Image (cartoon, rainbow, N blue to C red):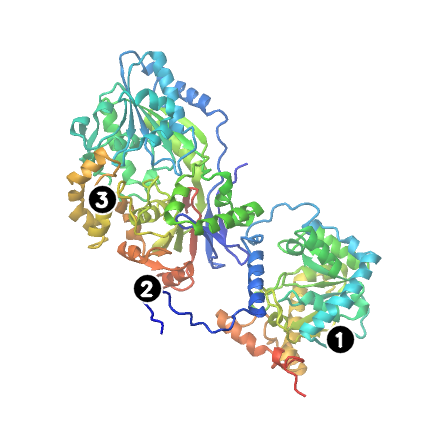
Amino acid sequence: MSVQLPGSQPPDKRLPVSSWSWSVARSGIRRRLRRASTFPFGSPTWPGTIALPPVEKSLGVYYDSDWARSPLARAARIALQTAVSNPLLRAVTSPTVRGLDRLADFDAPAIFAANHSSHLDAPLIVSVIPPRWRDELFVAGAADYFFDTHPKAALSALALNAVPMERQRVSRTSADRATQLLDEGWSMLIFPEGGRSPDGWGQQHRPGAAWLAVRSSVAVVPVYLEGTSRILPKGSRRPKPGRVTVNFGAPISPPSNGDSRTFARTIENAIATLADELTSDWYSARRRAAAGTTPPLSGPDATPWRRSWALGATAAPSETKRRGEQWPWNHKP
Amino acid sequence: MTRPGFVLEVDRSTPPILTWHGEGFRLESLPAGRSRVIYPPEPLESLKDPDATIRRALESPLGDSKPLRELLFPGMRLTIAFDDISLPLPPMRRPDNRQRVIEAVLDIAAAAGVDDVVLICALALHRRMTESELRHAVGDRVYDSFAPIGRLLQHDAEDPAGLVHIGVTEHGEDVEINRRAAESDLIVYVNINLVAMDGGHKSVATGLASYRSLRHHHNVRTMRHSRSFMDPEHSALHSSNWRMGRLLAASGVKIFQIETTLNNDAFPPQMAFLQKREWEWNPRDRASYAASTRGLSLLTPRLARSLFQSIKAPHAMTSVQAGEVEAVHAETTRMVHRQQLVEVQGQTDVAIFGLPHICPYNVNSIMNPILVMCMGLGYLFNLYRGRPIVREGGVAILSHPTPWAFHPVHHPSYIDFFEEVLSETTDPVAIENTYEERYATDEWYRHLYRTGHAYHGVHPFYMWYWGAHALEHLGRVIIVGGDRKAVRRLGFSPASTLADALEMASDVVGDEPTISHFHCPPIMIADVK
């Protein structure tokens, strides 16, 4: 019989089972990769209160994305979307598309204006927009985010036909380019909030979409996306599969008096009404819109936890696919 | 083109902010929408030819002074006094400003045939410098010329034979300074002006004074009426020194003042990220930060301290003025403000001060808990003009390891002060009334100060008084990442993280407090409107 002497090593009481597993190793690798991409290992973010320094003329808003609209690039994009991105998006988001019937009689170039809470929003909308617009559609991408390096800019331009758009201030360069493309018959996808929502609720709309619509006399199609903020919210790097609803609204023509500020509010209200439709029904939403009592996209004016709580309450039930419900992991005959 | 200092309003896109933490630093995220970061101006351009500028300044003095050449004559007694190791911070690369200026003065003295020259390091009650420290300050040529023949001295504020009582000011302040200096035909004072508090009449009236003289302005009342002591126009410390300086001038003590200013280029290129704005960090800066923090985490505190104490700043001279004391100092202050002033609008509920590894009293030494208090609440808190950056009743959050560690040779009386005095009370007035006299006149401390490398017995008291204004002004002081027992002994609250500290602060200043992060070093002065 062995005797444990004071000061000697205690017996090894671990179970004879290795704690190592592939999932543990994978989560460790993911953690390291995530850490490696954030400041100070990755590039620092730029404070919104500091004016951006003059960027290299070939980057940011000055990036020339004309090549992405050449026949070759368009063919490559269609192949990429058909073979890679659309199947992936369908697998991850299981989108339900509503309201396309509102576009049945509409055939002109349009500005699709949507709420924005996830990196999935742009590719998802592009994947569900009817082909007559999708084939000649460009996406307004943040010049300071998607066009700050050459690889990012090239990928954004190729995959989404993104065009750099200044979001910190009004830029003649980006406005002129967008107007020119609209005049040439291209449609546009833009997120009037200017960036992804930090908490799932909407942010204040910027007047860029309305201003471009007025300037080019192009109708705006409001779009409301519900569910992407749960699948890939801002700050998250790994999507959690779930269900998304895309609700298209009726096209709205810009006012003849050229009042883009009022038009911006009209667009925002239209998107809010589309959101309201998803939480109740079309008619109730219309009545609230008529009475001016549509719940705002910005959510309740309350403390962060109550806003977060209210966001959960607005979500449709069983909107998230749980892994256990999916074949083949929990297949039940 | 040097960019001025500025205030960053923190928003969601603001990257984490570098915060000093003793021999290390951290990146801390600040709450968006209610935080601001105060950044110092970038380093001013240095003088193209410092030595030529020094010679010109000596030939074209300010005020009613004659050129130095005309003040020197054969047979005269010339004393050259110079600032001690507490300046600049971190110590600058060779050649030090003092070396450049002293060599220029000695060139002229040699040409004038002056034989009786003595150099005195103006220690006041600071520790005596070692040979290597003196060599670094004055240069090998000067050291080797004067030290071996006993003409490179260090001021002894406890030598009865070496002091002379000049008189009493109209406010009843005794003026007692170094006898050799007072009885010289000319004192040339060689100064390095790092902050607005330095220089002027303070150079001689404090640097060459005795305890009997210093206690008139190094006390709680003066500190509480200096708002701040970095703002000469509103500093009781400054006023007292000016009264003493004018009495010296009226008594016939002739002073030729030479003041130099430095830019705030405080860290070598390998550590350039320490004085850059975080969103401008390039890949090299980020790699330096990552390597530094990783490397430091592998070092023992002692090794980390040695590493940081070996840093020599690439400070460069931005101006040199010579001549009559007050005229010289006015120009010096203007240059210091040009480098350091940052305009700040209003006060906030909370101020965050990341404390670096060094303060004026722990060069080549340990930053003990009392010096942590002095650095945070004495120096950084007082780096303002107008009003403090934190409102009355607000909270100061300091970040420093605050080790329960003391340098036994440099800070012997600090150990007893920490163990005996602070365990009884942290109230500056009670400390001053009950304990100061005993420590100031203790024979053992006096012996260590005069013969070893110890700070004077009363010095920890002065460090405590240095923070008296802040202690009176603030509602709470929290130290992040400090030794809990040491922090509690100081009378402050320990916190593990900055987030915890901000939660604790909300108990005092309410929820959602406004926050200022003082991005120092490099040194700056917040001009609070």
Quadrant containing the N terminus of chain A in the rendered view: bottom left
Labels 3 and 1 share a subunit: no
Direction from residue B367 to residue B341 in the image, left or right = right
Tag 2 residue: A7
Quadrant containing the C terminus of chain A in the rendered view: bottom right
Front residue of B94 and B31:
B94
The location of residue B523, given as percent across then percent down, is 42, 42
Q: CA distance from mark 3 to mark 1?
A: 83 Å
Name the residue: 76% across, 66% down: A81
Q: CA distance from mark 3 to mark 2?
A: 41 Å
Secondary element under disc 1, as helix, strand or loop, is helix
Amino acid type, residue under disc 3 in the picture:
Ser
In the rendered image, the vertical position of residue A200 relative to residue B348, given as above or below: below
In the rendered image, the vertical position of residue A293 relative to residue B15, given as above or below: below
In front: mark 3 or mark 2?
2
Q: Residue furthest front?
A: A1
Tag 3 residue: B413
- Total count of labels: 3
Labels 3 and 2 share a subunit: no
Labels 1 and 2 share a subunit: yes
Tag 1 residue: A100
Q: Residues within 10 Å of mark 3 (few under 14, many from 20)?
A: many
Amino acid type, residue under disc 1 in the picture:
Leu
The image quadrant that residue A237 belongs to is bottom right
Q: Residues within 10 Å of mark 2 (few under 14, many from 20)?
A: few
In the rendered image, the vertical position of residue B432 relative to residue B503, given as above or below: above
Amino acid type, residue under disc 2 in the picture:
Gly
The location of residue B219, given as percent across then percent down, is 23, 43
